[in-house]
Amino acid sequence: MEPDKNQEELEKDIKEAQRIADEAEGGTRHVTGWSSWIVPVLALSWSLFQLSVASWLLMDSTYIRSIHLAFAMSLVFFTHPAFKKQKKTRS
C-alpha cells in the first residue's frame, strides 16, 4: 500500500502547488453557464470587427473607439460579473 499512499500524497501536493500558483498569478476565472458561450462568441466578433476595420470597413474613429470600448466592457462584465451569486443555505 505504500505506492498508493505516495501517489495520493503526490496528487495532493500537485493540487496545493496549483492553488498557490493560481493565487500568485492573480487566480483564474472559470466561466460557467451561458457566459461560457457568450464570451468566445463576443471575443470572436470583436476580432472580426477589428480585422474588418483594418482592412475594408471605413468608419469615423469616434465610432470605432466606442464599439471597441463596448466590446471590452462586455467581455469584462461577462468574465467578472458585478455581483456574485448568493449561495443557497438550508434553513
Image: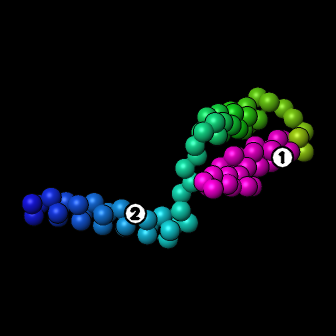
Amino acid carrying label 1: it is Arg
Query: Of circles 1 and 2, which is in front?
Result: 2
Q: Is tag 1's residue or tag 2's residue first in the polypeptide sequence?
A: 2
Q: Residues within 10 Å of mark 1 (few under 14, many from 20)?
A: few
* Pointer 1 with pointer 2, Cβ within 8 A: no
Residue extending furthest toward the front: 91
Q: Residue at x 23, y 60 (%)?
A: 8
Residue 84 visible in the current orientation:
yes
Point out residue 43 in the picture as x, y percentages from the top left corner.
65, 39
Which mark identifies residue 73? none
Q: Which residues are magenta?
A: 64-91
Point out residue 27 in the picture as x, y percentages from the top left corner.
53, 62
Q: Residues within 10 Å of mark 2 (few under 14, many from 20)?
A: few
Q: Is residue 90 left or right of residue 17?
A: right
* Residue 41 figure quarter: top right
Relative to 8, residue 70 above or below: above
Q: Is residue 49 left or right of residue 89?
A: right
Identify which residue, 46 or 31, lies in the foreground. 31
Mark 2 residue element: helix
Mark 1 residue element: helix
Instruction: Name the residue that disc number 2 marks.
Output: 18
Relative to 64, residue 1 above or below: below
Instruction: Name the residue that disc number 1 marks.
Output: 65
Q: Residue at x 69, y 46 (%)?
A: 78
* Residue 54 figure quarter: top right
Amino acid carrying label 2: it is Gln
* Residue 70 figure quarter: top right
Identify which residue, 87 or 51, lies in the foreground. 87
Q: Residue at x 73, y 34 (%)?
A: 49
Residue extending furthest toward the top: 56
Residue 61 visible in the current orientation:
no
